[in-house]
């Protein structure tokens, strides 16, 4: 080996050594980093779940709730909403209840105050779901008519009454129906509430109907904007179309409501007369937003009253009554050319899988999806007025997730100072921001 070769060799050996040591320091660095990260992670983890920091009855937010507002690396959301709904089993201290259950007892903007809404909510079970729905849509300047099914358990009704008695603008309908799925009673329940709502002191502009398994996507302020946008300010929203042929049996053959159970078609010989006043029957959703003047028309006009009587022995009359009347030229706010437009509900129908949605992550009941938390991003993207359906028992995570997303938005939009009891979650520290090794 010449000197030059030796120099060359030692240089390359030296380079190799350098490379080798760089590799080793890299690996060492990586190892230390992994160690530090694990320590931080393990330290952060039990801290976040420590029972000292969270009451045991309080469910944490589901990990796959992807829509919560962002937090810092060192914080996360903790639900402050950990109530036991047995609270409503006894007499209520109203101010305590409103505080404990996070009701917003102030009007959040002038815009909302200037456009009061009326709500009809038909319920028969799941008190927790009802309380959470009511507190999501409650505003002191609106008015709420609650129709409790006449066949609901007595203690359920009493609990709803106690709750309603805590608010001057929430009341139970003066007449209760025994509601049958797809029956006339379902339609009648809404009309009972309308009779009460037109007598209420609140000068509401539009009425919106809900069932106990709905939950809002829009805030009250967004509802007020939507109701006043160009397309809807002068019109009722009753998404639907001319009755398709395969739906004709619903109004061509007489049906019988077996009270509180089901609706049956009578034999083919029990044909119904054509619809009164030459009305063309439409078919659509049972959900609507209606102008006050339209509701007065429903309650007073001969056409509306005769159509109501004619609908008594039809199948699921709430799916033709509103949309049919909303195509009558004389009806205030009618939309005679109207079709399916109106973003009234996000619903995953089983037969719309692959078209309107990519499947239900919860489970289907009567062809409608009961949402799980994985469905929440789809619901939010749809940005309908409300989403249907939720259950507080089978998929509680979905409601926890959407509820916090909704409340956070409501508070962000508020034009008045926020009270801490209005929040459903707080941002807690999960690990220390400064790390010393
Ligand atoms: C709620 O309270 C009732 C009685 O006050 C009790 O029996 C029930 O176990 C409680 N439920 C939870 C989940 O803590
Ligand atoms: C109701 O609860 C409030 C606290 O929220 C309390 O100050 C008040 O004394 C209670 N009233 C009654 C009658 O217990
Ligand atoms: C319609 O009904 C409302 C309330 O039910 C009432 O105030 C109003 O005067 C009625 N209008 C007509 C034209 O009968
Ligand atoms: C965070 O820092 C405080 C004070 O600096 C210390 O008492 C606490 O133990 C630390 N907590 C964690 C999880 O490192």
Image: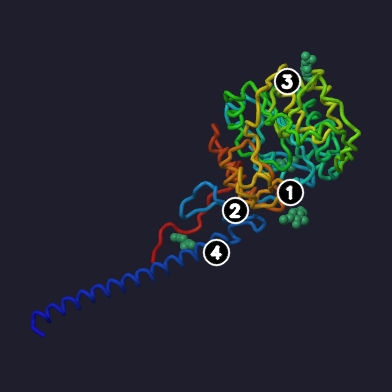
Q: Is residue 372 above or below residue 254?
A: below
x, y percent for residue 10: 16, 79
Q: Is disc 4 surrounded by few (<14), some (14 to 19) or many (20+) residues within 10 Å?
A: few
- Quarter holding the N terminus? bottom left
Rounded to the nearest angstrom, the CA distance separating label 3 from label 2 is 48 Å
Nearest-to-viewer mark from 1 and 2: 1
Q: Is disc 2 surrounded by few (<14), some (14 to 19) or many (20+) residues within 10 Å?
A: some
| Circle 1 residue | 365
| Circle 4 residue | 46
Rounded to the nearest angstrom, the CA distance separating label 1 from label 2 is 25 Å
Q: Is residue 231 left or right of residue 159?
A: left
Helix, strand or loop at mark 4: helix
Nearest-to-viewer mark from 4 and 3: 3
The tag earlier along the polypeptide, 4 or 1, is 4
| Circle 3 residue | 328
The tag earlier along the polypeptide, 4 or 3, is 4
Nearest-to-viewer mark from 4 and 2: 2
Nearest-to-viewer mark from 4 and 1: 1
């Amino acid at each position: 080996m010449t000197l030059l070769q030796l120099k060359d060799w030692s240089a390359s050996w030296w380079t190799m050594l350098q490379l080798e040591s760089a590799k080793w320091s890299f690996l060492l660095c990586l190892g230390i980093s992994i160690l530090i990260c694990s320590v931080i992670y393990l330290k952060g983890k039990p801290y976040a779940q420590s029972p000292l920091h969270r009451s045991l009855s309080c469910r944490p937010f589901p990990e796959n709730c992807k829509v919560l507002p962002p937090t810092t690396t060192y914080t996360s959301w903790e639900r402050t909403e950990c109530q036991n709904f047995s609270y409503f089993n006894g007499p209520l201290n109203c101010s305590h209840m409103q505080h404990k259950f996070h009701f917003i007892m102030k009007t959040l903007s002038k815009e909302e105050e200037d456009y009061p809404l009326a709500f009809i909510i038909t319920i028969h079970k799941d008190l927790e779901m009802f309380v959470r729905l009511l507190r999501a849509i409650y505003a002191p300047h609106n008015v709420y008519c609650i129709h409790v099914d006449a066949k609901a358990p007595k203690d359920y009704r009493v609990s709803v009454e106690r709750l309603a008695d805590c608010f001057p603008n929430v009341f139970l309908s003066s007449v209760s129906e025994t509601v049958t799925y797809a029956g006339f009673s379902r339609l009648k329940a809404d009309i009972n509430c309308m009779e009460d709502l037109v007598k209420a002191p609140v000068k509401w502009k539009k009425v919106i109907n809900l069932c106990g398994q709905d939950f809002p996507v829009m805030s009250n302020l967004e509802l007020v904007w939507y109701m006043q946008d160009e397309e809807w300010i002068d019109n009722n929203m009753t998404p639907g179309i001319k009755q398709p042929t395969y739906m004709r049996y619903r109004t061509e053959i007489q049906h019988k409501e077996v009270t509180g159970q089901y609706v049956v078609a009578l034999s083919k010989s029990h044909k119904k007369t054509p619809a009164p006043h030459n009305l063309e029957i439409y078919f659509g959703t049972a959900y609507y937003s209606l102008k006050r003047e339209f509701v007065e028309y429903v309650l007073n006009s001969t056409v509306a009253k005769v159509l109501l009587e004619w609908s008594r022995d039809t199948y699921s009359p709430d799916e033709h009554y509103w949309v049919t009347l909303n195509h009558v030229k004389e009806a205030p706010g009618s939309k005679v050319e109207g079709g399916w437009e109106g973003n009234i509900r996000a619903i995953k129908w089983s037969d719309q899988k692959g078209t309107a949605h990519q499947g239900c992550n919860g489970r289907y009941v009567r062809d409608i999806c009961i949402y799980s938390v994985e469905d929440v991003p789809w619901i939010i993207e749809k940005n309908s007025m409300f989403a249907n359906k939720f259950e507080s028992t089978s998929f509680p995570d979905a409601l926890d997730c959407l509820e916090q997303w909704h409340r956070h938005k409501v508070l962000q939009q508020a034009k008045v100072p926020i009270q801490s009891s209005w929040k459903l979650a707080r941002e807690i520290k999960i690990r220390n921001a400064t790390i010393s090794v």
